[in-house]
Amino acid sequence: MPAVRPYVLTIAGFDPSGGAGLISDIKTLEMNRVYGLAVCSALTYQNHEIFTDAEWLPAEKIIRQIKVLGDKYDFQIVKIGLIDITNALLPVILYLTEQNKDIRIIWDPVLSSSSGFTFNNNISDSLLREVAGKAYLITPNIDEAKVLTDNKGNPEQEFITMTGNSNCSILLKGGHLKGNTKDDILFTSGDEITIGGKSIEGYSKHGTGCVLSSAIAAGLALGRPLERACRDAKEYTRKFILSNKTLLGYHYE
């Protein structure tokens, strides 16, 4: 373990309950032994059960926050969560890649809340391809994958083609699949890698997608290969889910 922890930047919404968004990301990064920097991209009005509204921060205000941090801290990994996909996502990604061509961006495409509130549903396949041209990893669940791709019935086939033609990988999360198997599939360089998982009966948590993507970001910042970072993050998320029987999980090293 390095004497000085590497920095990871998270760009996400502020969830006052602390179960998802910036607060959850920072907890996850800290427990995974990296130092988390945070930029707010949306104010949300919610608790762990109810979501009533979101106020988007425009791209220029998000970029102003990033610039102040970038002037002082050397972060090579950035995780993007809840953001105005239509107006802010691409300008923010372009700014980050213009400042550092080697930066690795993880986009967790938050399209709706766990309580059913829809944030972003006007998304095109071309947008996904633009993001894939700049990002290092995209982490949709199966419902998000169907929204993001033109091939609604078989997004996996589109992911194989897309990752075979770019440097971006896609982790298709299996948590929303029916049945006992909750495998994730990592699409990278046109290959498929299964990351096994099982249903955890009687346990459910607010913010698991935020936890998983932030734990992956931490693993990458610590120098782990992508597949190992994804496997380690899935195990960390499993422990988070099992931490108690409420919807608000606890974080442990």
Image: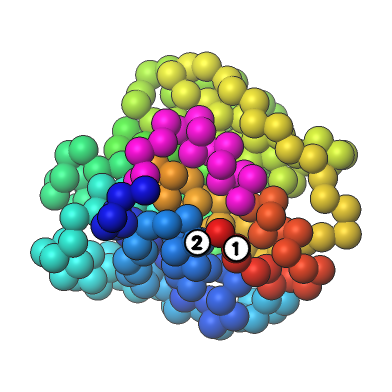
Q: Nearer the viewer, residue 237 or 209?
A: 237
Q: What x and y, as percent, mark residue 60?
A: 22, 68
Q: What x and y, as percent, mark residue 25?
A: 48, 64
Q: Look at the image and tell me whether residue 42 can be seen.
A: yes
Q: Amino acid at mark 2?
A: Met
Q: Which residue is mark 1?
A: 252
Q: Point out the image quarter for the C terminus.
A: bottom right
Question: Up-down: is 100 above or below 245?
Answer: above
Q: Nearer the viewer, residue 191 or 217?
A: 217
Q: Residue at x 56, y 51 (%)?
A: 212
Question: Up-down: is 205 above or below 246?
Answer: above
Disc 1 residue crowd, few under 14, some 14–19, many 20+, Cα 10 Å: few
The colour scheme applied to this rendered structure is rainbow
User: For the magenta stretch, what is the residue range?
Assistant: 221-236
Earlier along the polypeptide chain: callout 1 or callout 2?
Answer: 2
Dot label at residue 205: none
- Spatial CA span between label 1 and label 2: 6 Å
Dot label at residue 31: 2
Magenta stretch secondary structure, dominant = helix
Q: Amino acid at mark 1?
A: Tyr
**Can residue 186 be found in the magenta stretch?**
no
Q: Residue at x 48, y 46 (%)?
A: 216
Q: Are marks 1 and 2 in contact (CB under 8 Å)?
A: yes
Q: What x and y, as percent, mark residue 15?
A: 53, 76
Q: Residue at x 60, y 65 (%)?
A: 251
Q: Look at the numbered disc 2 and give the secondary structure of its residue.
A: helix
Q: What x and y, as percent, mark residue 27?
A: 50, 68
Q: Nearer the viewer, residue 187 or 90?
A: 187
Q: Nearer the viewer, residue 243 or 12?
A: 243
